[in-house]
Amino acid sequence: MPDKSLSLFERLQLRNQFETLRLLTENNPKEEFNNEYYREMIEVLEEGYEFYYSDLYNAFDPKPVPSNITIFIFDVLDMYWAIESFKKKNPSDKDVDDHYLSTFRGFDGNHETEYLGMLRFILKKGKWKEVAQSASKTGNFNSHMELVGRYSAMVDIWKALPEKWDLTKEQVLEILKAGF
């Protein structure tokens, strides 16, 4: 939880920002909820209702996502890009295509939320399109099961390969096997 104390100057700055947002959304019926929230926060700041300062932070996760999680996700996406490349070159290979982990499943929305949130942010940037195409098959990448440990084992195998961008069937199956 963020520090609940705000100086008078900080309250004034935040109050003015909320007033600007309120004015920008004032005549838009779609923004009615936000406009009411802005009015409430203005009152909280003007009156110094310290107990409600935490409401100012509702949109923020107080704990940042560590860089190592982002780098891990990059590695997982790169690995799946290589697997998708193999599948594209070998569309009739059912051993790979039918394997549960041959399609990127995402992360568990209940226990791997940092991973899932960061993944969705990364994919919005437009990279790893081949991997992103599986979103409709996977519930927008909510795997509903914890997969970080499995992906970690798979990435370790993939990274150790001498030519990790042009995989053979045996290499893909070895990577997928590491996930079980």
Image: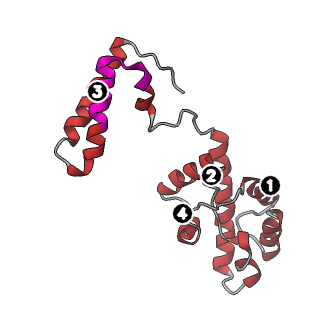
Residue 140 numbered tag: 4
Q: Determine the main secondary structure of the stretch shown in magenta.
A: helix
Q: Residues within 10 Å of mark 2 (few under 14, many from 20)?
A: few
* Disc 1: which residue: 156
Q: Amino acid at mark 4?
A: Asn
**Eyeballing the image, is 94 above or below 71?**
below
In the rendered view, does 140 fall on the left or right side of 149?
A: left
In what element is the residue under mark 2? loop
In what element is the residue under mark 4? loop
Give the CA distance from mark 1 to mark 2: 25 Å
Q: Quadrant of the C terminus?
A: bottom right
* Disc 3: which residue: 42
Give the CA distance from mark 1 to mark 4: 25 Å
Where residue 12 sits, quadrant-wise, is top left
Give the CA distance from mark 4 to mark 2: 14 Å
Answer whether labels 3 and 4 touch (C-beta < 8 Å). no
Eye-nearest disc, 3 or 1 = 3
Answer whether labels 4 and 2 touch (C-beta < 8 Å). no
In the rendered view, does 56 fall on the left or right side of 179?
A: left
Q: For the view shown, which residue lies furthest in the left direction?
A: 27
Question: Who comes first in sequence, dot 3 or dot 1?
Answer: 3
Eye-nearest disc, 4 or 2 = 2
The answer to whether any part of residue 14 appears in the image is: no
* Disc 2: which residue: 110
The magenta stretch is 37-53
